[in-house]
Amino acid sequence: RKEVEQDPGPFNVPEGATVAFNCTYSNSASQSFFWYRQDCRKEPKLLMSVYSSGNEDGRFTAQLNRASQYISLLIRDSKLSDSATYLCVVTQNTGNQFYFGTGTSLTVIP
Amino acid sequence: NAGVTQTPKFQVLKTGQSMTLQCAQDMNHEYMSWYRQDPGMGLRLIHYSVGAGITDQGEVPNGYNVSRSTTEDFPLRLLSAAPSQTSVYFCASRRRDSPGQQKLFFGSGTQLSVL
């Protein structure tokens, strides 16, 4: 069983749309949670950390449900520049091992 | 600051050849790691290090060796390349403390093909 599972998509949405991604993790002892963004043929970059109380960064909102072991990312008012693959990431134990989901592909259409 | 620098960007090997992927960071990060990214598999941790002289295995360590003689450098060695090691390799670093607050800084990746 994979540590982190994501729907690979692709999600194709028009500009201005709201889109949501979910991710589940298998280890209830997972400690820290993140969303990373990866553009085609580029390195992943941190989009935002995910906190138990939920957190927002501009058009992006992340939420964590520890009881159900899932993480979500909501993107409002989608822009063309949001087109990328979004990676769900969790850490375990000492935080030395980061587990990545396979990513969800988003294309924002003009 | 250059951040995390990986070389080479592209490499083609024949089965059985050896090579070293280089990774260097100038942010004084204690933690460094190597990942491979394959289609449909996501990034998987190969090896990591929490400081000079300390290394440990990740999810997929077989076929790879690492060493950490300095804080700045964390090379990944393939002793006898196999076609199954064809992948994109990323080096990443972060400060060691408070992993919940720390982001991984990635290098730009190495595309490796083993024929």
Image (cartoon, coloured by chain):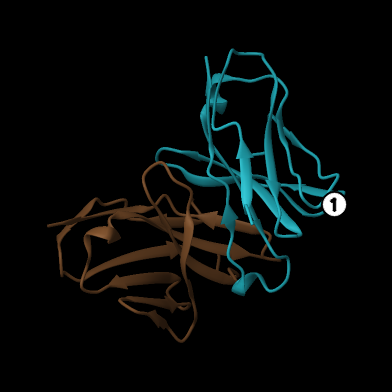
Chain colours: A brown, B cyan
Give A43 or B15, whichever is nearer the viewer.
Answer: A43
**Is residue A74 or residue A69 the one in the foreground?**
A74
Q: Which residue is pictured at 20% across the width and 71% down the height?
A: A18
Residue A107 position, x and y percent, is 22, 53
Image x and y of residue A47, in percent: 44, 66
Q: Nearer the viewer, residue A53 or A24?
A: A53
Residue A9 appears left or right of B55: left
Q: Secondary structure at mark 1?
A: loop
In the rendered view, tell whether residue B18 sits above or below residue B46: above
Residue found 16% across the figure and 69% down from its top: A17
Q: Nearer the viewer, residue A94 or B53?
A: B53
What type is the residue that disc 1 sits on?
Answer: Ala
- Is residue B104 shown left or right of residue A110? right
The image quadrant where one finds the N terminus of chain B is bottom right
x%, y% of residue A102?
A: 42, 49
Q: Which residue is mark 1?
A: B52
- For residue A1, side relative to residue B101 (left or right): left
Percent position (x, y) of residue B5?
A: 63, 45
Number of marks in picture: 1
Kindly identify the residue that appears in the image at 49 percent across and 82 percent down: A52
- For disc 1, the chain is B
Figure check: A106 above or below A58: above
